Every structure is written in structure tokens, then in C-alpha cells.
Amino acid sequence: DVKVTQSSRYLVKRTGEKVFLECVQDMDHENMFWYRQDPGLGLRLIYFSYDVKMKEKGDIPEGYSVSREKKERFSLILESASTNQTSMYLCASRGRGETEAFFGQGTRLTVV
Amino acid sequence: LAKTTQPISMDSYEGQEVNITCSHNNIATNDYITWYQQFPSQGPRFIIQGYKTKVTNEVASLFIPADRKSSTLSLPRVSLSDTAVYYCLVGPMFSGGYNKLIFGAGTRLAVHP
């Protein structure tokens, strides 16, 4: 079974802190994604990566950056957390040319 | 990437067949149609994918008319455990490095006893 693991299920951070959300997948997938999910808005793509060190902005990249130094790990970075970044964050991976994407369980981040 | 439009919510009862329609008027020739299901407090999971006509698996059927401007996810004899949000995605499967997955707001299905 493909496994996508997010480092934390729940996280509480203070405004202005630098926050790292980690995602690891074990199926050698080329593509990895970070989304945020807010009530009534569905999943919105923040960033995705199609290979090591390669990244592309999604629909809402402002206030976020990403890092993909190794194929299995994709990190989402909030440089200076703000209260409007309180949300559920979901990571996904998919092999190149494959049908199905696999999601992690999500990290519920609260910025106070 | 093609924009999709789905109903915001639907209600059904146990044992009924549920059909959720997705509109994608500007679908491109190399686009596929994919549906995901999301339960509360979980990440979405893949249900079914198709390009044209009909696709069926153990979970659902996907009907795609000839013009491909819409698609219908059909869930036979739903149970309470089918209560979830259903997302329709349209996009190319093989697109080199640019392999985005763009989700809309989805359809919230509530199944009642």
C-alpha cells in the first residue's frame, strides 16, 4: 500500500513563527502536492513538485514556500505564520503518468 | 485546465442510486475525468477515472456523453457510509512535468436512514 505520511496531525503555532509541515511518501512518486482545505472552499493547490528540486506554484502560493531536496519528502514552509493560514493542510503524491493520487491524513494547523 | 461545476450538496436515502453530475464545458482533447471521495477528517481517495462512454468498477460507474462536456458519477444503492464530499477533476493524465491536480469545491452528499 502506498503511504503518504504527514509529520503532525495537529499543530498550534504563534503568529510570526516559521512553520514546517513535512510530508513523506514511500512509493518513489515523482509528483507531490500541498493543498489547504477550508470549509466551503474545497481543496486549493498551494504548490506542487514534479521532481527533486523542481516546484511550481499552485493557485494560492502567497505566504508559503516549499522544499524538495529528496524524492520522498516534500516540505511546506510558512515563513511567518499568520492567523489566516489556520487551515487543514493535505499532502498528496502521484507517480508520473499514473491515474491515482494518494493523500496523507492531513495536518490541522491553528495559528494563534 | 478545464473548470468544473458540481452541485454544492445532495441528499439521498439508504438503498437509493445517487447520480452526481459535473459540468466541464471547456474540456480538452487530452483531458481525463477523475472523481475523488473525501470523508471527514481524512484525505481524498480516488474513486474512478474515465475518458469517454462508461467506466465501471466495484465502487461506482462513470458516464461520459459523446461531447464530454459533462460527466455523471453513479453510486448504486448508497449506504450511510457513502456520506462524503465528492470531487470531479478534469485534466491531462500525461502532461510531463506539469501534472497538476486541481480540485473544485465538491459535492457534499448526505445519505439518510
Image: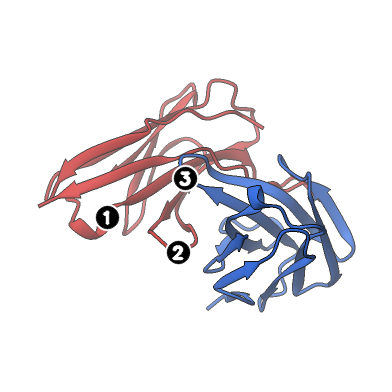
Residue at (74%, 57%) from the top-left corner? A81
Q: Chain of mark 2?
A: B
Chain rendered blue: A
Q: Which mark is residue A96?
A: none
Q: 10 Å neighbourhood of mark 3: few (<14), some, or many (≥20)?
A: few
Q: Dot 1, how many residues are within 10 Å of its Cα: few (below 14), some (14-19), or many (20+)?
A: some
* Disc with the residue nearer the chain's start (1 vs 2): 2
For the residue labelled by badge 3, is the local secondary structure a helix, a strand or a loop?
loop
Tell me which chain appears red: B
Task: Say what amino acid the circle numbered 1 marks.
Answer: Asp
Marks 3/1: CA–CA distance: 19 Å
On the rendered structure, is A63 left or right of B108? right
Q: Which residue is painted at 65% across and 35% down in the image? A: B30
Look at label 2 and name its amino acid: Gln
- Tag on residue B42? 2
- Whether B10 is drawn above or below B48: the answer is above
Question: What is the chain letter for disc 1?
Answer: B
The CA span between labels 1 and 2 is 14 Å
Q: Seen in the image, is A55 located left or right of residue B99?
A: right
Callout 3: chain: A
Residue B22 in the image: x percent, y percent? 43, 31
In the drawing, what numbered circle is on residue B82?
1
Q: Up-down: is B108 above or below B42?
A: above
Mark 3 or 1: in front is 3
Q: Tell us which disc is closer to us: 3 or 2.
A: 3
Assign the C terminus of chain A to one quadrant of the image. bottom right
Q: CA distance from mark 3 to mark 2?
A: 14 Å
Quick check: A74 left or right of B76?
right
Do the residues bearing badges 3 and 1 touch, measured as CB atoms within 8 Å? no
